[in-house]
Image: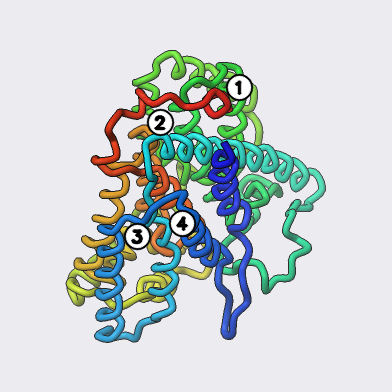
Amino acid sequence: MRKVPLYAGLAVVFLVAQRLAIPVPGGQVSINVAFAAVITIYLIGSSRMQIAPEIVILILLFAAVGGASAILSPIGANLLSLVQVLVLWMPWLLRSRSVVESQYMTRSAGLAVIYVTAAASAFSLIQIGVSSSSGIFLDPFSGVPPEFLLSGYNTTYNVGSIGTWDKGNGGIFLEPSFLSLFAGISITMLVAQERMRPLLRAGLSLVLLAGLISSAALSGLVVLPAVILVLLRHPKRGLILSAVVGIAAIVAASSPVIQGFIARLTSGGSNDARLVRPYTELLPIVLRDQPLLGFGPGAADEIASQLSGPDWQGEVTAPTLVKLLFDYGLLGFVIMLTVVFVVAARAGFPRVVVLALLISLLIPTNGLANPLLAPLVGYLLAGGSVTSKTKTRSHAEVKVPIAVRNA
C-alpha cells in the first residue's frame, strides 16, 4: 500500500515544481528535468518498475538522428536542446511489472492529477477575484528569486479587452493555458473514473470547469473529443456533467470571466499561434528545404520567435508535431511518434484518457521539450503500461484493494 502515495506523490512533484528552475551558466534548466531523471532511476533501481528495452532502442535511435541533425544543420543547432529532450523523456522508458502494479499507479497518479488541478482551479478563482477588486495578482511563488523561476512563460497577463482582471494560472502552472489544458485532462479522467461518489464527481467537475474558464485560455478545449467519447460511454455521468455546466452557465453568464472566455473563442491571437500559423508558416519551410533530418535541435523555437509579432497576439509557437519535423525531420518524427504510440497502446488508463493525454502532448503546445507535459504524460502512460505478455488477465479482472478503489 505504500506504493499508492508514492505514485501519487511523484505526479504531484511534476505539477507543483513546474515553475522552478536551476540556474546554470548562461541560463537556467527546469527543475523537472532533474526530477525526470531522478524519478526514473529511482523507480527502476528500487525494482518498483522495469525498463522497456524496445523504447530504449527507439530513444537511442532518436538521439542518433538528433546528433546527425545537429552536425548537418545549415543554421546551427543547440545540442543542449536535444539533451533536455532526452532527459525529459526518461519516464517514457518505464514499464509496470504487473497488471496490479499498473492499477496501483494509474489509479493513484490519476487521482493526484485531478485533485491538484482542482485545487489550482479553486485558487485561480481567488486570483481573478483579488485582481479584479484590488489589481493585485496573488502568486505563491512571488517570494522566489527570479533566477529560480523558469523564464519564457506567461505566468499571467492582463486581459485588457474585458477589464482589469488577470487570467488565473492556479498558482502552480507555467501559464493560464496549462491550467486550462490540465483542467480539460482532469475532467476527462474524472468522468472516466470508476467508483466515485456522484456528488464528489459533480463538485470536482464544477471546480475544474471554473478553473478552465478562469484561465480565459482555450487549450483545454482541444481534449473535447475525448470528453465527448467518455460521455457517450457513460450517459448518466454525461447528464450530471451537462447539468453542472448548464447551471454554471446560467449563474455566471453575465460575469466578465465568462465574457472574457467567450471573447477568446471568437478571436485569433494565441489560437492562430498554436493551431494555424505553425502549420502554414513553419511546416512548408522544413518540407521544402530539410525534410529528412530537419534544421537541428532547437531550430523551430528560434525561427518561430523570428516570425512572431511584438506581442503575444502575433506570436508563433512550435507545437510538438511541428517541432519534431522542423528540428529532427521525418526520421526523428517517425521514431518519436513510434515511442508515443507504442507506450500509449499498452497504457493502463482508459482509452479516452489516453486520447486526452496524447492530444495534450502533441497538438496545442511544445510537448516535446515542455518541462511539464513531456515527463508527466510519459510517467502516467509508461508507468502504467504493461506488455502483452504481462497482461495475463484484463484490468477489469484484477482486484484492487478497497483503499485504492475508494481513494
Nearer-the-camera pick, 94 or 226: 94
Q: Please, what is the three-letter code of the amino acid marked with disc 3?
A: Arg
- Residue on which disc 1 sits: 200
- Identify the secondary structure beneath mark 3: helix
Q: Please, what is the three-letter code of the amino acid marked with disc 4?
A: Pro
> Residue at image x 49%, y 59%?
313
**How far apart are labels 3 and 2 at the CA level?**
26 Å
- Residue on which disc 3 sits: 277
Q: Is residue 269 visible?
A: no
**How far apart are labels 1 and 3 at the CA level?**
40 Å
Task: Name which of mark 2 and mark 4 comes first in the sequence.
Answer: 2
Task: Name which of mark 4 and mark 3 comes first in the sequence.
Answer: 3
> Residue at image x 51%, y 16%?
240
Q: Position of residue 97 (x, y in %)?
A: 38, 45
**How far apart are labels 4 and 3 at the CA level?**
26 Å
Nearer-the-camera pick, 392 or 18: 392
Q: Residue furthest right?
A: 134
- Residue on which disc 2 sits: 227
Badge 4 crowding class, 10 Å Cα cut-off, few under 14, some 14 to 19, many 20 or more, is many
Quadrant into which the N terminus falls? top right
Task: Name which of mark 2 and mark 1 comes first in the sequence.
Answer: 1
**How far apart are labels 2 and 1 at the CA level?**
18 Å
- Identify the secondary structure beneath mark 4: helix
